Amino acid sequence: MENTNSSIQEIQNFKGKYPKQLWYLFFSEMWERFSFYGMRGMLVIFMVSQLSMNDKVANLQYGATQAFVYAFTFIGGLFADKLLGYRKSLFWGGLLMIVGSIILAIDPQHFFFFGISFTIIGTGFFKPNISTIVGKLYADDDPRRDAGFSLFYAGVNLGALIGGYICIAVANGSLWSSLVPAALRWNVAFGFAAVVMLVSLITFTQTQKSLGAIGLSPLAAMQASKRKRLELATYIGSLLIIPIIMTMVSNTDYTDIFMFIIGPASLLYLFYEMRSFTAAENKKLIAALVFIVFSIFFWAFFEQSGGSLSLFAAHNLNNTVLGVSLDPNGVNNAANSFFVIVFAALVGMVWLWLHKRKLEPNTVVKFGLGFLFLAGGFAIFYDTKFFADASGKTSLNLFTFGWFVITFGELCLSPIGMSAMTKLSPAKTQAVIMGMWFLASAYGQYFAGLLGANIADASEHASNLEKLNVYANGYKQLAIYALIAGVVLIAIAPLVKKLMQDVK
Ligand code: GLN
């Protein structure tokens, strides 16, 4: 036992700015996000062009798949905390993601929902747990934690940038079209996701020894054969629910029911766990819940990206950014990640600069600022309608600028929120809280689909120019709501700060 403790301490006592394990996790997550965002960027366009869905249905379907992906992070977090440990969960999740992408690469037209269901469960086991492991590299009071999450977030976005651009551009035929036969474009694009996920998994397995005791089984004290049986049951159980997921994802009515249940169920579970914590711990958990609830709204707007903004990009944007010719869908998928990578460090430095002058806003105010930037970005998306030509095509430059502004909002909210989850939660329930953080994204995605479907519905059978107007007006509404959310958050900041106690 003593050995195990000292090894975690050794890891946490690292010298310098970042622990070396963070770099391994950075690359593993980078490739996983390549695969994830590569696929995400293809979903709506694939469903409309290959599965002949109309825009509204595709938006709802998109929201449903993404909602399930993030909802399963809650379940994946739960199983990791209680049964598998973070490392085995991550391995199993990665394996399922690879299988899912291979299925899609072989025949996406016929096995679309089957393949997607594998990736949904796989991401659930992978995504929250790798983030929790990052948190474990730091001692409770280590001030380097936020910087670690920011670096990790840059890895997320490096993967998202490359995958988000390449996959859809290959599928659309605007990249490497001479190398990839037209009939196989979608297969190759989904195939990329499989290959890079394999790279992610190999990176993890080859470096996981360096994690010492972090992420090992929570059932170490249990008899080995009994533990193995429980683990096996988890693996088999996660395979058995694939047909159920398939049915639920392909019928969005079931998604509605699922979303209706999973959120309240997760809250009940958390309240149940809270009985065994101290009042001070519980206050922190309530603060975590405030962040989680607001982040739902943030992601609902932000995630128009893969839904309605994908269609907006396909119909209404020209294809040049600063004189360079680029695929507008690729830009919609990748611009945000590009800006995160370029500006994450700068934002970190601004916080540090403000901190030295005792002016650094606390996490709640940062969240509020996140919404104000989001509002600014959507106001810019709205403004694109004033720059359209007669065919309804408008400026990709201005659109890209909108993403530039939103990115600062994301940087005020997402890495900081993730880091706050690890600080506000007692050790025993960290993966569940991280799962709830991503569950908020599930609701965000779900609402993103509904919002996007409304926008798409209003523009069915419309000319390109009319479509532009409907979409732009929809984005104006979102800008106003984001503004309101930002103001509310800043107003309640003192209250939430009290709940957070020593956590900044
Ligand atoms: N872009 C981040 C990621 O992929 C955050 C996603 C989210 O929480 N919705 O990790």
Image: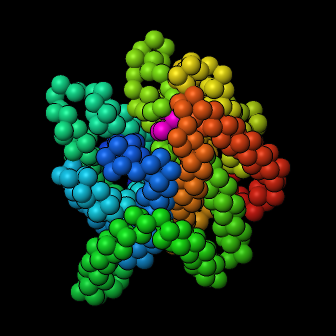
Taking the spot 37% from the left edge, 70% from the top edge, the residue there is 247
Say left or right for 249 vs 143.
Answer: left
Q: Where residue 24 sits: x, y (%)? A: 33, 46
Q: Nearer the viewer, residue 236 or 221?
A: 236
Q: Can residue 448 be seen in this view?
A: no
Say left or right for 467 vs 52.
Answer: right
Taking the spot 83% from the left edge, 49% from the top edge, the residue there is 491
The quarter of the picture where the N terminus appears is: bottom left
Q: Nearer the viewer, residue 120 or 28?
A: 120
- Tell me where residue 89 sits by quadrant: bottom left
Q: Is residue 436 above or below residue 13?
A: below
In the orientation shown, which residue stands out farthest toward the top?
Answer: 323
Say left or right for 150 vs 384.
Answer: left
Q: Nearer the viewer, residue 58 or 65?
A: 58
Q: What stretch is highlighted in magenta?
A: 309-313
Q: Is residue 244 above or below residue 480?
A: below
Q: In this view, does 449 lie above or below 369?
A: below
Dominant SS of magenta comes to helix
Residue 312 located within the stretch drawn in magenta: yes
Taking the spot 47% from the left edge, 64% from the top edge, the residue there is 252
Q: Can residue 246 be seen in this view?
A: yes
Q: Where residue 19 sits: x, y (%)? A: 41, 46
Q: Where residue 52 sits: x, y (%)? A: 36, 49
